[in-house]
Image (spheres, grey):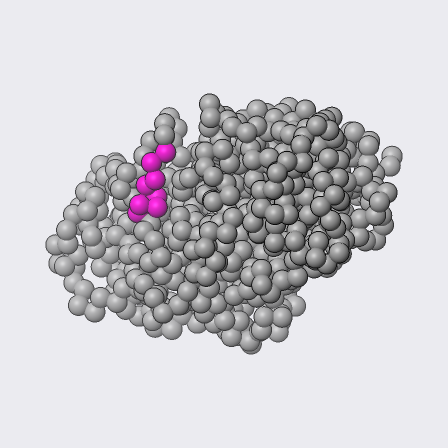
């Protein structure tokens, strides 16, 4: 991988309060305040944005072309330069990053949203699986994550008390995050959902949205006191069939991290998109995250997991810590697909002036 | 850190491989994975490359409900050789095939990757697109029975505004279906087609007749995009990207021009600016545009600047857009002859590239040097276009 040919930074981040249901709101209504938040933070107007890119899923919305409604909220008039990915918004951020690299735009608005509340998300996610051989069996997302957790326990990489500690640490950290859905030290470990995963090992199901603004070079410095520079970003996929993968490892996350330059110098913060406790064990190993690194200070996806936005939120949370001066070099990770099939890693840095 | 000047960053992008499946109503002999693999393999063969030569995969398709698989790229990672590689899934409605190619081109232009496989597909036989588009959503205006019902009133508006004779649509369909006979990959091969048959076909959505409507197809289209170094190794002449752009506008708003949307005009203007085209009618040799209903040919001729407002139908009527005309349009037979929805935009882009590479076989336009590929989607609101040339860009 070659180093990026242009310096690009996250200059603003906003997210909704994540909630179990948002019946009274459409996706557009949920998204609008977040878009205004990041535009207001930078003083930009829609017309100032060079490129807009979003991530969402028709299967969550229950209708085709669901992203077109969100576009109405963005205010695409006069017409805008715009694109959409049918996956987590972290990949929309990646597409926007490449657009800015070409020099065709200096600023980009990236947003993502997902409402899991209208359906049964465990059932919905089974539709992601091989449609001929696996999906007809309806193996749900918790069951697949439990397979992964069991493989880790069998390999001696973790045990149930260690998983419980990850859950407690995450929700305790989320006590300081006003947007989190599940927070505080008193969230119970609970009963088994699918052995060995208990309710506490699983993410809350909820609705939410997030937005990020990217800017290049001096434009980033104009828009933000302390931009979070993207030193590297890469994403990699693994095979789909769980039977051909080693579920205790994540070679795709490791490769993405290597290409993003994550191993060149230690990071002080990591925001990991590990919706299930056991997946943090996999990622810590693959991404070589030591004990000194502050992992998921936001509470991570165990505290709020709006599907399609949760990965973008990891990048946003890491950037926000740099904006606030709480981090100098942070790693952000996003995932897509069953048992961490696809992984994205971004390395963000603050700039000493 | 300093921010260096803008345009100097961009790496020129070349198309060195093109592959598509024989488009048909139902490919029951292959899975979705088998379908995309076939197109990808043909693109690799055309470029004389193999899977390890590919740095990243960019895949596009229209709504996931069309096959009933959520985010199918996850399941397709193996078939597309994407294991251990970046794989990006684009979805921008009907324009997606074009947008997907442009996102892939950006990976090369930004120098993130050297050689990228881009692919778009639809396997409509797995489900039913018309009803996949028509899921009832509370408090939102229903699309009713598919896309034809949505677009027919806009065609009627065009006819009223321009005073075009009722027969123009049938001329487009008759031409495109005849062009398809020269394209071995086209879905519809109606050897006994006559203008009278088109004009006598049943009325579906007045004024759009059955024979003026796109079919439902299973198919995939793939391209290999690469940088200058990759193009230098190409065994066949590359097509060079001279300009590419996307534009979006809202679905519905007061004052929207459904006949000639502003986003389409802006998108074309951006492409022409990049490619230094000042007179598209004179400087562009042929156009492969997204015409799912026959009347969209004259409508897009105006929207893209090939004819003045109200004059597009005159080019069609005068035979200018015929394969041997002065400005051939839809040499491949177009969307009217082949419509695997998610792939339809990329097939337009690929046909433009085939033409400037001189690889279009029986539907080759003699001496085509600059050809426009065009796609649109949603409620005439998403546009993606590229202009490709036989020569590399001069800057």
Estimate the x, y position of residue B315 in percent, counting from the top left.
28, 52
Direction from residue A348 to residue B158 in the image, left or right: left
Query: Residue shown at 45%/37% (left/top)?
Result: A119
Count all numbered tags in the image, as a single digit.
0
**Dominant secondary structure of the magenta stretch?**
loop
Is residue A204 positioned above or below B390 on the image?
A: above
- Based on the displayed image, in which of its 4 quarters is residue A326 positioned? top right
Query: In the picture, which quadrant includes the C terminus of chain A?
Result: top right
Q: Is residue A314 magenta?
A: no
- Based on the displayed image, in which of its 4 quarters is residue B48 positioned? bottom right
Q: Toward the viewer: A219 or A275?
A: A275
Query: In the picture, which quadrant includes the N terminus of chain A?
Result: bottom right
Direction from residue B24 to residue A92 in the image, left or right: right
Q: Toward the viewer: A76 or B245?
A: A76
Q: Is residue A255 visible?
A: no
Direction from residue B37 to residue B56 in the image, left or right: right
Query: Residue shown at 70%/54% (left/top)?
Result: A152
Estimate the x, y position of residue A167 in percent, counting from the top left.
70, 38
Query: Residue shown at 67%/32% (left/top)?
Result: A188
Query: Residue shown at 51%/58% (left/top)?
Result: B75
| Residue at the far front in the pictured view | A191
Q: Toward the viewer: A32 or A104?
A: A32
Q: Is residue A352 visible?
A: yes
Estimate the x, y position of residue A177 in percent, counting from the top left.
70, 27
Q: Which residues are magenta?
A: B130-137
Estimate the x, y position of residue A161 in percent, counting from the top left.
74, 43
């Amino acid at each position: 991988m070659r180093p990026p040919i242009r310096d690009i930074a996250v200059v603003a981040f906003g997210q909704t309060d994540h909630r179990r249901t948002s019946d009274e709101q459409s996706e557009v209504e949920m998204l609008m305040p977040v878009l205004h938040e990041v535009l207001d933070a930078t003083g930009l107007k829609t017309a100032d944005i060079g490129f807009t890119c979003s991530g969402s899923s028709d299967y969550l919305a229950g209708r085709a072309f669901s992203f077109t409604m969100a576009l109405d909220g963005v205010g695409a008039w006069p017409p805008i330069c715009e694109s959409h990915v049918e996956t987590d918004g972290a990949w929309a951020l990646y597409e926007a990053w490449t657009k800015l690299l070409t020099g065709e735009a200096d600023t980009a608005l990236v947003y993502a949203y997902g409402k899991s509340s209208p359906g049964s998300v465990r059932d919905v996610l089974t539709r992601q699986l091989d449609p001929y051989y696996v999906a007809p069996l309806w193996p749900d997302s918790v069951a697949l994550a439990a397979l992964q957790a069991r493989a880790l326990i069998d390999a001696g990489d973790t045990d149930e008390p260690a998983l419980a500690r990850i859950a407690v640490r995450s929700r305790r950290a989320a006590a300081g995050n006003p947007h989190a859905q599940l927070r505080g030290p008193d969230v119970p470990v609970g009963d088994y959902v699918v052995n060995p995963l208990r309710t506490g090992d699983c993410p809350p199901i909820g609705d939410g949205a997030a937005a990020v603004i990217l800017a290049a070079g001096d434009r980033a410095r104009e828009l933000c006191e302390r931009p979070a520079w993207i030193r590297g970003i890469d994403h990699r996929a693994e095979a789909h069939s769980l039977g051909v993968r080693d579920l205790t490892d994540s070679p795709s996350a490791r490769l993405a991290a290597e290409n993003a330059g994550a191993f060149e110098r230690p990071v002080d913060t990591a925001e990991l998109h590990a919706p299930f406790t056991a997946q943090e064990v996999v990622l810590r190993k693959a991404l070589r995250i030591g004990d000194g690194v502050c992992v998921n200070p936001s509470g991570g996806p165990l505290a709020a997991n709006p599907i399609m936005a949760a990965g973008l939120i990891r990048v946003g949370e890491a950037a926000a810590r740099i904006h606030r001066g709480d981090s100098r070099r942070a790693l952000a990770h996003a995932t897509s697909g069953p048992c961490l099939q696809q992984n994205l890693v971004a390395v963000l840095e603050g700039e000493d002036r | 850190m300093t921010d260096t000047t803008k345009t100097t960053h961009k790496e020129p992008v070349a198309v060195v491989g093109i592959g598509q499946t024989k488009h048909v109503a139902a490919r029951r002999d292959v899975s979705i994975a088998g379908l995309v693999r076939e197109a990808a393999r043909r693109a690799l063969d055309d470029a004389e490359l193999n899977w390890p030569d590919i740095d990243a995969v960019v895949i596009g398709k229209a709504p996931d409900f069309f096959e009933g698989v959520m985010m199918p790229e996850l399941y397709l990672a193996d078939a597309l050789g994407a294991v251990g590689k970046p794989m990006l899934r684009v979805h921008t409605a009907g324009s997606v095939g074009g947008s997907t190619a442009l996102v892939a081109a950006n990976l090369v232009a930004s120098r993130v990757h050297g050689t990228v496989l881009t692919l778009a597909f639809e396997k409509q036989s797995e489900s039913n697109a018309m009803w996949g588009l028509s899921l009832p959503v509370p408090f939102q205006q229903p699309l009713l029975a598919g896309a034809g019902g949505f677009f027919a009133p806009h065609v009627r508006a065009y006819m009223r505004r321009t005073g075009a004779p009722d027969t123009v649509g049938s001329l487009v369909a008759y031409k495109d279906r005849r062009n398809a006979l020269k394209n071995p990959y086209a879905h519809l091969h109606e050897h006994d087609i006559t203008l009278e048959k088109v004009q006598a076909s049943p009325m579906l959505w007045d004024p759009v007749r059955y024979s003026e409507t796109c079919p439902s197809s299973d198919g995939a289209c793939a391209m290999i995009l690469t940088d200058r170094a990759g193009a230098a190794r190409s065994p066949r002449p590359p097509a060079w990207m001279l300009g590419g752009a996307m534009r979006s506008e809202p679905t519905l708003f007061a004052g929207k021009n459904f006949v000639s949307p502003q986003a389409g005009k802006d998108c074309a203007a951006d492409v022409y600016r990049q490619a230094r085209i000042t007179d598209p009618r004179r400087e562009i040799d042929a156009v492969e545009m997204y015409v799912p209903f026959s009347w969209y040919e004259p409508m897009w001729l105006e929207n893209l600047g090939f004819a003045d407002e109200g004059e597009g139908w005159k080019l069609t009527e005068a035979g200018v857009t015929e394969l041997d005309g002065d400005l051939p349009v839809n040499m491949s037979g177009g969307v009217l002859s082949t419509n695997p929805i998610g792939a339809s935009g990329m097939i337009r882009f690929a046909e433009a590239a085939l033409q400037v590479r001189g690889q279009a076989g029986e539907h080759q336009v003699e001496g085509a040097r600059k050809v426009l590929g065009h796609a649109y989607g949603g409620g005439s609101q998403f546009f993606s276009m590229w202009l490709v040339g036989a020569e590399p860009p001069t800057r």
